[in-house]
Image (spheres, grey):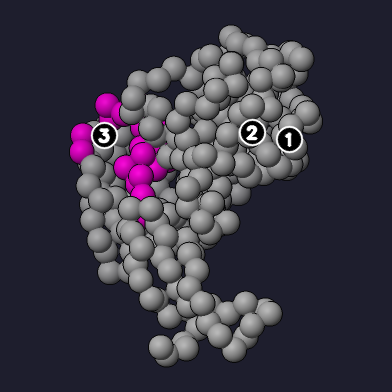
């Protein structure tokens, strides 16, 4: 077998987004071995024939990603604004071809941004700094959450990362009921993309954003807060820390932001009145 670094050996499955490649371990540089590596591909979201954004993402659940991105970026108000969607191969990746309503497409053209993202980058390519932190309607205070229910959810979050369990290379976003049960989750190499997939799926299925919270395996950046708030999510739990801009946006839009979520531990950054222990 030819020992070429990162030689593709076998396409394990396009569905799971995992490939086997040849690699070397530090303790044995003379003998290559096979291991699983997460796929990362350019995904272009094309609205009515015009490419709007290119993101690096895992090549699965892309319809949910496109729907969630469209909602969380304010391109559409509901899934009904999308008349059709197809995922097709492109020259170097994949395209999600989306047919928008005429009204929504006109609005998109007025504020069109040519984003060229890194892995799930939420700000790459914005035309002006003023485009960052766009206003979000303040959230209502309609629910509460018992932090004692968080620990069980944290223990089961990994169940929504089959690719991550094989490769150690994905983030997860899941919906957590007040009981602590996780009902639906998605993973991706990009944390923003994983969240968009979750938002898209729940919106497509007509699920309510009340009676629950979002739990993510990553840090809480401002984009994660803003995307959640745009879809009506009142509580966001993150396994890692939050950034200062995330805290500012969460405070402004009435979102309860919680970071450093580990069994028996959590740091509440904003609006603790929704929480109890």
Q: CA distance from mark 2 to mark 1?
A: 7 Å
Q: Nearer the viewer, mark 3 or mark 1?
A: 1
Which quarter of the figure has residue 145?
top right
Q: Nearer the viewer, mark 3 or mark 2?
A: 2
Say whether residue 202 is left or right of residue 180: left
Q: Residue at x 40, y 20 (%)?
A: 207
For the residue pair 81 and 28, the one nearer the viewer reads as: 28
* Percent position of residue 244, x then y: 75, 40
For the residue pair 30 and 186, the one nearer the viewer reads as: 30
- Residue identified by numbered label 2: 154
- Residue identified by numbered label 1: 262
In this rendering, the answer to whether 146 lies above or below 135 is: above
Q: Residue at x 60, y 11 (%)?
A: 143
- Residue identified by numbered label 3: 82
- Do residues under tags 2 and 1 come within 8 Å of each other at their CB atoms? yes
* Percent position of residue 252, x then y: 67, 26
Q: CA distance from mark 3 to mark 2?
A: 34 Å
In this rendering, the answer to whether 184 lies above or below 41 is: above
- Magenta residues (range): 59-84
């Amino acid at each position: 077998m030819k020992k070429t670094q990162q030689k593709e050996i076998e396409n394990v499955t396009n569905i799971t987004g995992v490939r086997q490649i040849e690699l070397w371990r530090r303790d044995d540089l003379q003998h290559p071995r096979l291991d699983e590596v997460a796929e990362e591909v350019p995904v272009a979201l094309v609205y009515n024939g015009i490419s709007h954004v290119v993101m690096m993402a895992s090549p699965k659940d892309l319809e949910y990603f496109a729907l969630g991105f469209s909602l969380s970026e304010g391109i559409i108000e509901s899934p009904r604004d999308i008349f059709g969607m197809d995922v097709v191969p492109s020259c170097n990746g994949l395209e999600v071809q989306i047919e928008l309503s005429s009204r929504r497409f006109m609005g998109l053209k007025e504020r069109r941004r040519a984003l060229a993202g890194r892995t799930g980058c939420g700000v790459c390519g914005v035309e002006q700094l003023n485009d960052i932190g766009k206003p979000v309607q303040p959230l209502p205070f309609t629910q509460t959450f018992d932090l004692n229910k968080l620990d069980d959810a944290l223990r089961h979050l990994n169940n929504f990362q089959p690719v991550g369990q094989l490769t150690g290379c994905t983030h997860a976003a899941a919906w957590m009921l007040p009981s602590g049960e996780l009902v639906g989750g998605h993973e991706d190499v990009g944390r923003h993309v994983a969240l968009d997939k979750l938002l898209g799926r729940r919106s497509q299925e007509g699920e309510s954003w009340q009676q629950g919270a979002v739990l993510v395996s990553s840090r809480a950046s401002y984009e994660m807060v803003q995307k959640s708030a745009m879809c009506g999510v009142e509580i966001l739990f993150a396994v890692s820390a939050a950034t200062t801009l995330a805290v500012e946006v969460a405070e402004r839009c009435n979102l309860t932001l919680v970071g450093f979520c580990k069994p028996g531990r959590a740091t509440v950054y904003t609006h603790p009145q929704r929480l109890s222990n």
